[in-house]
Image (spheres, rainbow, N blue to C red):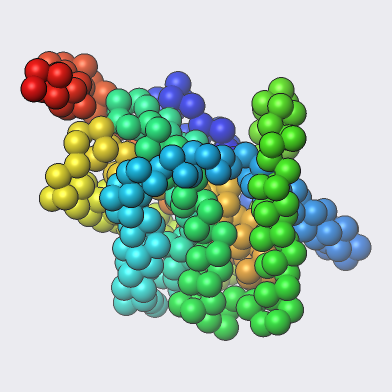
Amino acid sequence: MAPVFRPGRLRRVVDPYVAALLGTVALATLLPATGRTATAVGWAADAAIGLLFFLYGARLSTREAVDGLRQWRLQTVVATSTFVLFPLLGLAAAGLVPYLLTEDLHTGLLFLCLVPSTIQSSIALTSTARGNVPAAICAGTYSSLLGMAVSPLLAAWLIGSAVSFSADGLLTITTQLLAPFLAGQLARRPLTGFLTRHKKPLGLLDRLSILLVVYTAFSRGVAEGIWQQVTPIRLLSLLCVATTLLALALTTTSLAARRLGFSREDRITIVFCGSNKSLATGLPMAAVLFGASAGPVILPLMLYHQVQLMVCAVIANRWSRDAATSPAPESARREETQRAC
């Protein structure tokens, strides 16, 4: 899934993909698509969303998901953080309206809390911090699979009328999200070689598709006066709220993992997988669920994504240094103990 995120990028302050997203927002602000161009761009964005979710389905390994059942306690903690803790925090943030957030920005923040966990960045962060990488792969896979059904349902329940969840909306969600995703899962085996050989160009296609979705959403938002509603002060307030949300998620998952007796490696996996949110899945999903109103809704997700990259990169590098100076990882000590017994 886009954006591709590797351990070597952890030292960067601003992720290049986020910079491209911000540039796309600026382009849509200065040169929004209108008239027939807007119609054509909208059709192209719809096709791009279908292609994105087809590729997501083709890349997700069912075998990895089945193997992950062996660590059901860890997967349960991550899923609970993603689909229970975050929605509760999002609902609690309603008290910030109208002081720090507008109604639209709170809707976006609540939607951010319903998005599944990311895969690439969680794996990269877990690997850098010397955590349980196979468990991180499984956690990301499970979260993506659950998110396909759970995120739209939670959005319809918690956000309500802002979500296009009528009969026509349900049909749109099925045809643009679920059907392509399931088709990708069914086509996974024959496409595995092709996806492996063309990993880089397909990754670029992913990113370009998401940029098209963002351009379409903000073009509609500009037409509706989004920047009259979202002032610089509101953006700064939103950044503070997103940072606080991440801090609460990191603290809660860390404390829960310790109290439940997980090893150091598993705690690292829980913290990163349980606190990260997927930009690649969330942006096209927002475009489908919110339609012309998606512009202000995706702002919290974009800001949170950048904050999570910066903060989690610092944490991952620190934990990596701590692991390098420790005598041995906990898993290695356990294996030595078992052999001795």
Residue shown at the point (28%, 50%) measured from the top left: 73
**Residue 260: image location, x then y, percent:** 16, 50
In terms of depth relative to the viewer, which is nearer, 158 or 69? 69
In terms of depth relative to the viewer, which is nearer, 132 or 187?
187
Q: Residue furthest left?
A: 341
Instruction: Give the side of residue 133 with respect to residue 116, left or right.
Output: left
Residue at point 52% right, 51% down?
144
Q: Measuring from the top left, give residue 252's x and y in whole percent.
A: 22, 54
Can you name the residue that lies furthest to the front here? 341
Residue 288, horizontal then vertical, whole percent? 67, 65
Is 171 in front, or is 187?
Answer: 187
Name the quadrant of the N terminus. top right
Which residue lies at the image location 33% right of the left edge and 70% below the top edge?
Answer: 88
Query: Residue shown at 57%/83% (left/top)?
Result: 161
Q: Residue furthest right?
A: 36
Residue 325 visible, this orientation: yes
Q: Can residue 24 be seen from the camera position used here? A: no
- As drawn, 255 above or below 94: above
Q: Is residue 283 above or below residue 120?
A: below
Screen quadrant of the C terminus: top left
Instruction: Give coordinates of residue 299: x percent, y percent.
Output: 53, 58
